[in-house]
Image (spheres, rainbow, N blue to C red):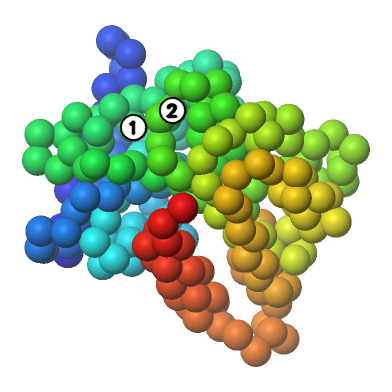
């Protein structure tokens, strides 16, 4: 397994860090880009685990930092800058001189997935599929203010993971939203899981097993033709 530190230009004056994860061997026609959530960065254990696991599935995987995390800040970038950073990561991988995968999938934890989906809906991020590692449908306790309008515009397949105890995605709200989508979609629920798929100790399934089951699902879904 090869983890290569890279530098991704964002606009003409700034850049962010990234990591390319690739296994040895010729099967690298699909790329997956992983974006982090609001309060973490590209080295979050969940993203690092999926990067190596997806590389084992034959993908070339790119993780990257949003600009505010690159600068060590807590205050999230503007929507415009978040969009631009996602697009920059896409173009970096799409034009890579060695890998340049034929198909690129956008994936993200919480904020990272939401920004990807908004960019896809706006026509500025030409990924082939979307994977949401905890979609933030609403702020905790604010189920009357859903972040769903742009999802109905998207025309590519989508895979959603949601913990049953996720305060950012009440399943009673998420499932009706997904039922209105006009594209192939699938929802995988993690029993007892929170926004990062952590489960109470009382749950018999261990954290590693949960991550592994999610990874298997992603690899199977990526192999599905729509």
Are the two marked residues, 1 and 2, in contact with CB atoms closer than 8 angstroms?
yes
Residue 216: image x %, image y %? Answer: 43, 72
Q: Is residue 52 above or below residue 210?
A: above
**Secondary structure of the residue carrying numbered label 2:** loop
Residue drawn at point x = 39 percent, y = 51 percent: 43
| Mark 1 or mark 2, whichever is nearer to me | 2
The image quadrant of residue 63 is: top left
Residue drawn at point x = 16 percent, y = 59 percent: 27
Label at residue 125: 2
Q: Quadrant of the N terminus?
A: bottom left
Is disc 1 surrounded by few (<14), some (14 to 19) or many (20+) residues within 10 Å? many
**34 relative position to 141: left or right:** left
Residue 200: image x %, image y %? Answer: 70, 77
Report if residue 55 is visible in the image: yes
**49 relative position to 22: left or right:** right
Is disc 2 surrounded by few (<14), some (14 to 19) or many (20+) residues within 10 Å? many
**207 relative position to 43: left or right:** right
**Secondary structure of the residue carrying numbered label 1:** helix
The image quadrant of residue 212 is: bottom left
Label at residue 90: 1
The image quadrant of residue 45 is: bottom left
Q: Which one is earlier in the sequence, the residue at label 1 or at label 2?
A: 1
Residue drawn at point x = 74 percent, y = 58 percent: 166
């Amino acid at each position: 397994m090869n983890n290569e530190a890279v530098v991704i230009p964002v606009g003409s004056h700034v850049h962010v860090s990234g990591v390319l994860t690739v296994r040895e061997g010729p099967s690298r026609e699909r790329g997956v880009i992983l974006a982090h959530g609001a309060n973490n960065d590209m080295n979050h254990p969940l993203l690092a685990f999926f990067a190596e696991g997806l590389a084992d599935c034959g993908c070339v995987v790119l993780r990257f930092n949003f600009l505010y995390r690159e600068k060590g800040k807590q205050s999230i970038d503007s929507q415009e800058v978040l969009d631009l950073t996602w697009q920059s990561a896409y173009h970096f991988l799409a034009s890579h001189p060695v890998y340049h995968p034929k198909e690129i999938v956008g994936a993200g934890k919480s904020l990272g997935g939401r920004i990807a989906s908004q960019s896809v809906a706006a026509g500025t991020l030409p990924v082939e599929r979307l994977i949401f590692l905890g979609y933030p449908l609403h702020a905790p306790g604010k189920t009357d203010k859903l972040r769903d309008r742009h999802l109905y515009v998207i025309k590519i397949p989508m895979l959603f993971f949601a913990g049953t105890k996720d305060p950012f995605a009440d399943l009673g709200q998420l499932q009706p939203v997904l039922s209105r989508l006009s594209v192939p979609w699938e929802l995988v629920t993690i029993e007892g899981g929170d926004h990062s798929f952590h489960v109470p100790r009382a749950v018999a399934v261990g954290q590693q097993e949960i991550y592994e089951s999610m990874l298997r699902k992603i690899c199977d879904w990526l192999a599905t033709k729509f």
